[in-house]
Image (cartoon, rainbow, N blue to C red):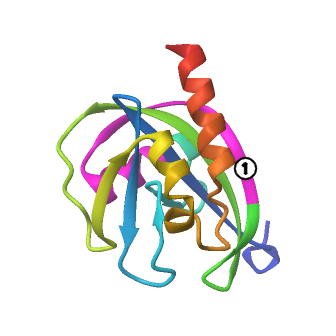
């Protein structure tokens, strides 16, 4: 395929769960949102390997990618993007944030619900219902 025919970027994100809590990262650049680790795939990159790479680059963590749980299509930083959000589990490592983020937190689904206006303020694809679905799938697999 000719790259000039490409219509949008592809991204992968990790609904990363450790001890029944999700990992959220706070972006340094606009949009200044909290969101799961992840990012755009490189050309011809396998989505699973790309997600592991992104999480390692952004957090220093090693993860297990379990399965896709949601997808979304929309605009992010004025670019059309198709994203796949995967349920993931923590394997090892200590968090060392990249320059892309200035803060992180492990947060329970209940705290996400209570503080939904703080965490879901953007037009990004991250929605409370997607975290709820990821947590439900996680509970069914544990």
In this view, the residue in front, 93 or 21, is 21
Which residue is depicted at the point 67% across and 62% down?
125
Q: Is residue 1 left or right of residue 12?
A: right
Q: Is residue 49 visible?
A: no
Residue 52 is one of the magenta-drawn residues:
yes
| Pointer 1 residue | 71
Rendering quarter of residue 75: bottom right
Percent across and percent down for residue 85 are 61, 47
When the figure is inspected, residue 90 is found, relative to residue 79, above or below; the finding is above
When the figure is inspected, residue 130 is found, relative to residue 5, above or below; the finding is above
Q: Residues within 10 Å of mark 1 (few under 14, many from 20)?
A: some
Q: Which region shows up in magenta?
A: 50-72
Which residue is depicted at the point 77% across and 73% down?
6
Which residue is depicted at the point 50% across and 50% down?
112
Q: Residue furthest front?
A: 114
Quadrant for the N terminus in the image: bottom right
Percent across and percent down for residue 60 are 24, 50
The mark tally for this picture is 1
When the figure is inspected, residue 52 is found, relative to residue 73, above or below; the finding is above
Q: Secondary structure at mark 1?
A: strand
Q: Is residue 128 left or right of residue 74?
A: left
Percent across and percent down for residue 43 are 59, 62
């Amino acid at each position: 395929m000719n790259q000039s025919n490409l219509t949008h970027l592809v991204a992968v994100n990790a609904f990363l769960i450790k001890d029944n809590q999700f990992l959220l990262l706070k972006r340094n650049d606009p949009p200044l949102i909290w969101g799961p680790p992840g990012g755009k795939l490189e050309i011809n990159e396998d989505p699973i390997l790309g997600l592991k790479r992104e999480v390692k680059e952004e957090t220093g963590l090693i993860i297990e990618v379990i399965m896709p749980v949601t997808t979304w299509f929309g605009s992010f930083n004025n670019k059309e993007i198709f994203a796949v959000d995967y349920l993931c589990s923590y394997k090892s490592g200590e968090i060392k944030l990249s320059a892309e983020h200035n803060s992180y937190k492990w947060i329970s689904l209940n705290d996400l619900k209570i503080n939904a206006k703080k965490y879901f303020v953007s037009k990004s694809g991250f929605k409370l219902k997607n975290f709820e679905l990821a947590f439900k799938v996680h509970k069914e697999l544990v």
